[in-house]
Image: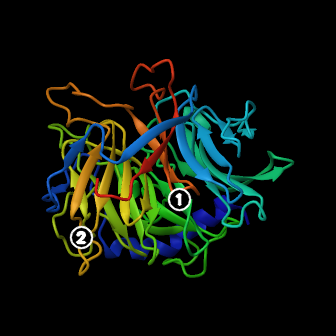
Amino acid sequence: MTRRSLLQQAGALVFAATAVHGVANAQSDRPVLGNLPVVPLEVYHLNPPGVTVETVAEGLDVVWSLEFARDGRLFLTEKAGRIRVIGLDGRLAPEPWVTVEDVTAEIRENGLNGLALHPQFPDEPWVYVMYTVEGGGGEVTNRVSRFREVDGRGADEDVILDDIPGAANHNGGRIKFGPDGMLYIGTGDARDRTRAQNLDNVGGSILRLTPEGDVPADNPWPGNPIWAYGFRNPLGIAFRQGDGQLFVADHGPTTEWEPRIGAFDEINIVAKAANYGWPRVVGAPGIEGLVDPILSWIPSVPPGDMVFHDGNLYVTALWSEALVRVSFEDSSDRNRVTRVERWFNSRVWRDGVMSESLYRRVRALTVGPDGALYMGTSNRDGRLEPEPYDDRVLRIVIDDGDS
């Protein structure tokens, strides 16, 4: 059975489950507006104390994902379709590890996006990617596949999930392995809001598959890759150290509806079979059957990637051009946000002008074996005029003292 036919059959199995939470709003309906979760005021640090930054590689083209292999190599994706490797000597290999030939990358958020290494890589020599391809009738779709490493290069592509909804925007694209050894995939609504509340369709969801691309037996709906749903454009996936709790960052409806709602980008704690509300709600209205975010923003952030490190959640911000650090320092409630800081940025946008940011749009994020954060810039993605050194991979060292 192909992955495609498996998805088509799964829709019939979960139609009743969709009805439990109600039918999605029509495209023209405005969502219920909730309040923002109560959190401390954000603190801005253009040059955060105790933090040093150095450039690891530059002259790249939209660094979308970063991940270290256990052997110390750093793998990264470039939007146009290249997987690149920074070797143990700290140098960027001149030739791509592989070039993904079918990538469509000319428009907005299309291109080679997510990357994840098999949990036992390189013993299990698979590198996983998610990317945009041309579909029928001028449309695009998204695909998850894996490449085998052979003699230090990628080969033998194996498509494990195809025909994920695609569009110029809202493709999702982040993929990460969880502590359970399963592959988690963030898919966007591909500019059709109804997908996010339709378990017949894998758009607007977090998917969960085995490393071979099969649906795990303990997924919430038999034969269906959906793990949780009700998302607009989830670009951040992170697992907390210790308990393995899944966190997901989603883009809010900054430019949708008239009058525009504006922002409501959010961080969610994600559970099996849970509904996160899009497009029925934004913010935290406290409606039974829908899960509210633990953090939401106005004006727009929006998140690009995120990772846990030393108990803090780090989130890259695109439009607001910062690295956000979210702290959880309440010993009685480890999910309560106690501090929010924006690094490398002096303050929020005012009257359409950014006061100052050091690295502008930042997206990819990972933790290195040396304990440093590694962050990729995204200034060649069509939103800004790139600087001569764009795009870059940055190494961020954080002093153990209070910052």
Q: Quadrant of residue 224?
A: bottom right
In-image side of 217 versus 322 (left or right): right
- Whole-angstrom CA distance, mark 2 to mark 1, is 25 Å
Estimate the x, y position of residue 129 in percent, counting from the top left: 63, 50
Q: Quadrant of residue 53?
A: top left
Estimate the x, y position of residue 105 in percent, counting from the top left: 57, 31
Residue 47's disc number: none
Estimate the x, y position of residue 337 in percent, counting from the top left: 23, 65
In-image side of 215 versus 189 (left or right): right
User: Relative to 269, does residue 348 appear above or below in the rendering?
Assistant: above
Quick one: quadrant of the N terminus?
Answer: bottom right
Q: Residue at x 61, y 31 (%)?
A: 80
Nearest the viewer among 243 and 20 is 243
**Dot 1 amino acid type:** Ile
Estimate the x, y position of residue 163 in percent, counting from the top left: 60, 50
**Dot 2 amino acid type:** Arg
Q: Earlier in the sequence, mark 2 or mark 1?
A: 1
Q: How is the image coloured?
A: rainbow
User: Relative to 156, does residue 96 appear above or below in the rendering?
Assistant: above
Residue contact between numbered discs 2 and 1, judged by CB atoms under 8 Å: no
Q: Residue at x 26, y 78 (%)?
A: 331
Q: Residues within 10 Å of mark 1 (few under 14, many from 20)?
A: many
User: Relative to 1, does residue 391 appear above or below in the rendering?
Assistant: above
Q: Nearer the viewer, mark 2 or mark 1?
A: 2
| Residue assigned mark 1 | 185
For mark 1, give the secondary structure.
Answer: strand
Q: Residue at x 27, y 45 (%)?
A: 342
Q: Is residue 191 visible?
A: no
Q: Is residue 94 visible?
A: yes
Nearest the viewer among 29 and 255 is 255
| Residue assigned mark 2 | 336
For mark 2, give the secondary structure.
Answer: loop
